[in-house]
Image (cartoon, rainbow, N blue to C red):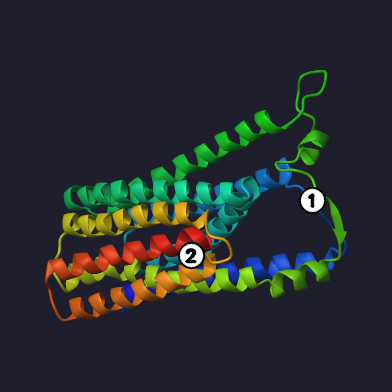
Amino acid sequence: MTIATAIGVYYWTGFAGGLMITCYQVTRLILRGPVRKGPTTLLQTRRQIVYLIIGLGCGALTLAGQALYPHCFVHTICRCIQGLAGAFIFFYAFLLSVAMFKGAQQVFAMTVASTALNVAEVLGSALGAVLFDRWGQRSVFWFLGVVSLWNQVLLLLVILHLEGHCTRRTPGGSPSRASQRAEPLEAPGVQQRSGWTNLLEVLRSQRLACAVILIVMAAIVKGSVEEMLPFHADHRWGFGPMKIGKLFSITAAGYILSAVACGKVWTYLQGWQVLFSAFWLMLLGCLALIVFLTSAYSKSEVVLWAGLATYGVCLGLTHTPAA
């Protein structure tokens, strides 16, 4: 019950965080009246990166708390904070990816990012398994906290790089504040539109509806497996940390291969992208469900590995186009 409570708190607070962000953005869109729909400026991108740093900072602090006090109450509170921080991180990371790339470039960038993410997951799962096996769970929390802090340093370096690349300099040689506000990251195309008009246009967008459906379907599978697998594998099957790390590496490998293939095919499809994703998601999702149901009554590693590989392919075919 305590494990289920901590997991439930994480997901419900993540949902609450996403709901808060959505309500804030919708209210801001409506109340500010006529808006300037134009290029994404350096200042806007910089603000999004700052929010990412704040979210990672909250995650690092809570991980340190879990390492110092590995008790159920502390774990539940930390998961609550991580859920809220995770919602902000996902939201602003998505905004940043949209701002920096467009069209086919965005698909390519998201494919590269997905590949890098899952290579990191393979290495991280293996390293986490070694740490847990030799030094216990506290070492894993400390490791995650240090990595989170390092990510904040990298994001600060990204801000400095963007300032050096995108801002114009005054005759004195220092970046001008006005130039930071005016320098676009993409081709200009300014329009004046009311907040209600923008909101209605977004709500009527078929692309938005399809993206939401794809992301929700993938997230249900992703969340249920990634959170419950370690506990299920540990308590039901008796697998050790090293075995669990290998299981996750199979999932990540399937994700990498399918994400790269899907990103390549996606750029050549004309009007069939959503149907393509939905078809593969349903087909592979059903297959993964059958394998997981089978593994619930069988301890065969072959069946479980097949299910995890299928699950990874399913995620790769879904997340890249949805993003």
Q: Residue at x 38, y 72 (%)?
A: 221
Could you tell me the amino acid type at mark 1?
Gly
Relative to 145, 290 lies left or right? left
Q: Residue at x 41, y 46 (%)?
A: 116
Q: CA distance from mark 2 to mark 1?
A: 33 Å
Residue 172 sits above or below residue 221 on the image: above
Q: Which residue is mark 2?
A: 83
Q: Position of residue 195 (x, y in %)?
A: 82, 66
Q: Nearer the viewer, residue 190 or 249?
A: 190
Residue 237 sits above or below residue 323 on the image: below
Q: Position of residue 136 (x, y in %)?
A: 22, 53
Relative to 154, 42 lies left or right? right
Q: Position of residue 286 (x, y in %)?
A: 33, 78
Relative to 12, 47 lies left or right? right
Label 2: which secondary element: helix
Q: Which residue is mark 1?
A: 38
Q: Position of residue 141 (x, y in %)?
A: 34, 52
User: For the residue carrying disc 1, how many other residues have a C-alpha within 10 Å: few (<14), some (14-19), or many (20+)?
Assistant: some
Residue 68 visible here: no
- First along the sequence among labels 2 and 1: 1
Relative to 296, 59 lies left or right? right
Residue 116 sits above or below residue 170 on the image: below
Could you tell me the amino acid type at mark 2?
Gly
